[in-house]
Amino acid sequence: MNNADVQAWLMHQQDAVVQRLVCWCAQNSGSYHLDGLAAMADLLEADFASLSVPMQRLALPAWQEIDHDGEPVTRAAAPALVWHARPTAAHRVLLLIHYDTVYPPDAVTEIRWDGNRCIAPGAVDAKGGIAVIHAALSAVEHFGLAASVGWTVVLNPDEEIGSPASCGLLQQLAADYDFAMVFEPALPDGAWVADRKGSGNFTFIVRGRSAHAGRNPAEGRNAVVQASRLVRSLDALNVSLGSAAEEDKPTINVGRIEGGGPLNRVPDLAVVRLNVRIGQAADEATLLAAFAELAERFSGDGFHCIVDGKFHAPVKKADQRALQLRSCMQRAAEAVGRSIEWRNTGGACDGSKLAAFGLPNIDTLGPRGNYLHSPQEFCDVDSILPAALTVIQALCDFEAHPEQWPRR
């Protein structure tokens, strides 16, 4: 690979890369916004057509979650978007990121600039990651690089809510590739993530008994008050659980409480939603047992409490193949003039699932940025092309020296 030629060609694409990113950010594609996801898929199909690889829209199964009334509701899924190049190649690489964001369907899209920072919904998480993929593969195909390596791009529509619909697809794909590149944002200083904590989302449904607040309040069972007691016990688990070092201890974050109604009625329903992070795989069983015990403890005397949910992202700890991939990817970055540091994080992503399914991966190959999921979210657009150049170098190195890289 002639780095100078490829870099010069990429630099000529800089304005187009940024224009595409702005266009993608202008399209709301929240996880629950099916029309917005469909419109985003159309944009991506048109923009990726330049690769001369047809896009497939793979239907994903519906999934269930608990609604505001504490009842299970079925949600439809948008399709996964898939491009296969050279699918019969002996060596294949999976490039993965999501095209959904966290923003609701009625969110107002505002795109602002602060120097080289594009401040917009999903700018770095993860539409900037898609921009890296597109730029890298455009150069690979334009110059005929890594011509014996097969690549597959998968953009899933539900990562921001735990990939409930696409998890099965990821498991199915994992066996077909040597390794994966996942394009979550790099850390703000450009570091890549090494190990990740596991994550799970859980919902406690507390049911009591309704009564008139003036006529017969003693006959009621106040679900909101009972849920408040439950929340205190959930928060106390942050202190009592886990024997690991402080950075690996489980953390329980109660993020939302729903319930109540007219102020003159004893409320008979409360819904408590929480997120859990764990640093050790064994803590999954510990927390599941603790949640079951709390559901039982807060049932009785007219109350009924149940818990729903699961761990959607397992703990990600590097094994030998993962360490081998880290070494190879770091060499590729250094070959194009980048200096990479590694850092552990409590954040979760689909890279954790792929690792659990046996596919080693680096999961922060996107551009630099910060303030994810907030109005201040930004992408450093000057970091897109260096990230793309790293991917190109890695694919070329893999073709030239496959024995140095993880293999199926």
Image (tube, rainbow, N blue to C red):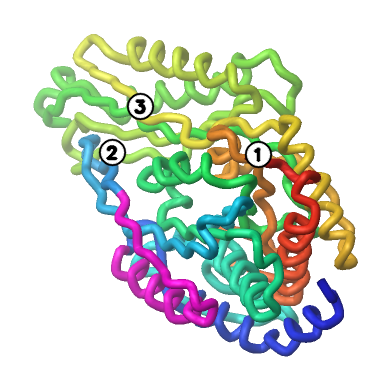
Mark 2 vs 3, N-terminal side: 2
Disc on res. 227: 3
The amino acid type, in three-letter code, at marker 2 is: Ile
Residue of label 1: 346
Mark 2 vs 1, N-terminal side: 2
Q: Is residue 58 magenta?
A: yes
Residue of label 2: 66
Residue 375 visible to an observer of this rendering = no
The vertical placement of 250 against 392, above or below, is above
The vertical placement of 259 against 183, above or below, is above
Mark 1 or 3, closer to the camera: 1
Residue 136 coordinates in the image, percent (x, y): 67, 71
C-alpha span from label 2 to label 3: 16 Å
| Element type where label 3 sits in the image | helix
Mark 1 vs 3, N-terminal side: 3
**In front of the other: 142 or 264:** 142
Residue extending furthest toward the left? 215
Relative to 234, 139 lies left or right: right
| Element type where label 1 sits in the image | loop
**In front of the other: 28 or 357:** 357
The amino acid type, in three-letter code, at marker 3 is: Ala
Stretch of the chain drawn in magenta: 34-60
The amino acid type, in three-letter code, at marker 1 is: Gly
